[in-house]
Amino acid sequence: MSMLERARAWAARHPLAVDGLGLTLLLALAVAWGEPRPPRAGWLVPAAMVLPLAVRRRWPVPVFALVAIAAFVQWLTLEISIADLSLLIAIYTVAAHERRRWLVVAAVAVLELGCLLAAARWSGAGALSPAFLTLSACTVAATVLGVYVRTRREQLAALHERAAQLERERDQEAALAAAAERARIARELHDVVAHSLSVMVALADGARLTRASDPAQADAAVANVAATGREALGEMRRLLGVLRRDGDAPLAPQPGLAQLEALLEDSRAAGLPTRLTVTGEPRPLGPGAELALYRVVQEALTNTRKHARDASRAEVTLRWEDDAVTVVVSDDGASALQPEGGHGLAGMRERLALFDGTVEAGPRPQGGWCVCAGLPR
């Protein structure tokens, strides 16, 4: 930073000190170079013109009025003085700090009248017009400079306010995004935990019932419980890992329609025979859409195991059509779950709504429960 820039920064931080130094210098020059008449007024009138400027930033219009009155007294009794520069400083302050335009215009009119009186008294013969034009030019320059400073200050204040507003909006958007992410992770955890725990409970019950009659089958069921638990823990670590900022959490691909068969194997291992039927020509979908359909199947099978009484089988049908892809999960059990009940159905609808999809769930006429989810292409 150069010396000039440091001086400007210091002046911006200490405006009162700058005013004090400038006014002291101006008053000293006015007293030293003036030729007062009568002599005792040599410092009184210049002081009356200069000293009010110390509070010009706080009361610009009253200070201008005091300075103008002192200048009129000087016009009546004294010669022209360097203290007359106080008028230019005062009119600049009015233009820079006063927002009421009529007051600025009134101050300029008063100063122009003073310029006319000064030119009429102190200019020589034939020099009235040049003197008046010169004084008027100084007045206009000081006023224009003050208006420019005020306008620039207001623009900077508006920019700062706009920046603060944008920062607040950014923080609000970040908070909303964080809330949406927390909701998404909560849905993922619900799907993973509910599905895995239902499978583990079913396997554990099967192992308990067959422990005496078929120890080998009981051991296989216990092994499946352990494998399902490890898989659930891995899924939870992956989901919670996205919240870590260090980025060292191992991430795995999100499941999709290619993993439906493995999902159905878990359902079969839990004691619910499940069949997958695919019709139509498969077409590539986005990973988000495939994840949504996968979670719908997962949640529907979990609800079947948890709520469907005496269910002997479940069927998953994946239909590829020209303008849509549809997944239907049905069972033959007697369910106590209402179409609008539970968080699972609400989570399904939220997932599919992101892709303009729909979810319908309810009892079948021939018995059992059916969940139908569709995504437009």
Image (tube, rainbow, N blue to C red):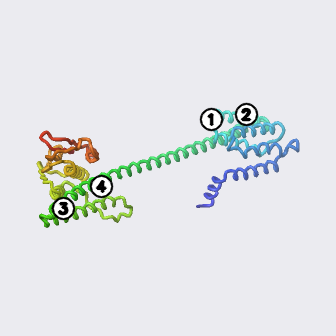
Point out which mark residue 208 bears: 3
Q: Nearer the viewer, mark 3 or mark 1?
A: 3
Q: Nearer the viewer, mark 4 or mark 3?
A: 3
First in sequence, mark 2 or 1: give its number.
1
Point out which mark residue 255 bears: none
Left or right of 280? Residue 109 is right
Left or right of 112? Residue 330 is left
SS at badge 4: helix
Q: Give the x, y percent position of residue 300.
A: 21, 49
- The picture quadrant where one finds residue 367 is top left
**Badge 1: residue crowd in 10 Å (few <14, some 14–19, many ≥20):** few
Q: Is residue 121 above or below residue 54?
A: above
What's the CA distance linking mark 4 and mark 3?
Answer: 28 Å
Q: Are marks 2 and 1 in contact (CB under 8 Å)?
A: no
First in sequence, mark 4 or 3: give its number.
4
Residue under pointer 2? 113
First in sequence, mark 2 or 4: give its number.
2
What's the CA distance linking mark 4 and mark 1?
Answer: 63 Å
Report the residue at 87% width, 42% height from top.
37
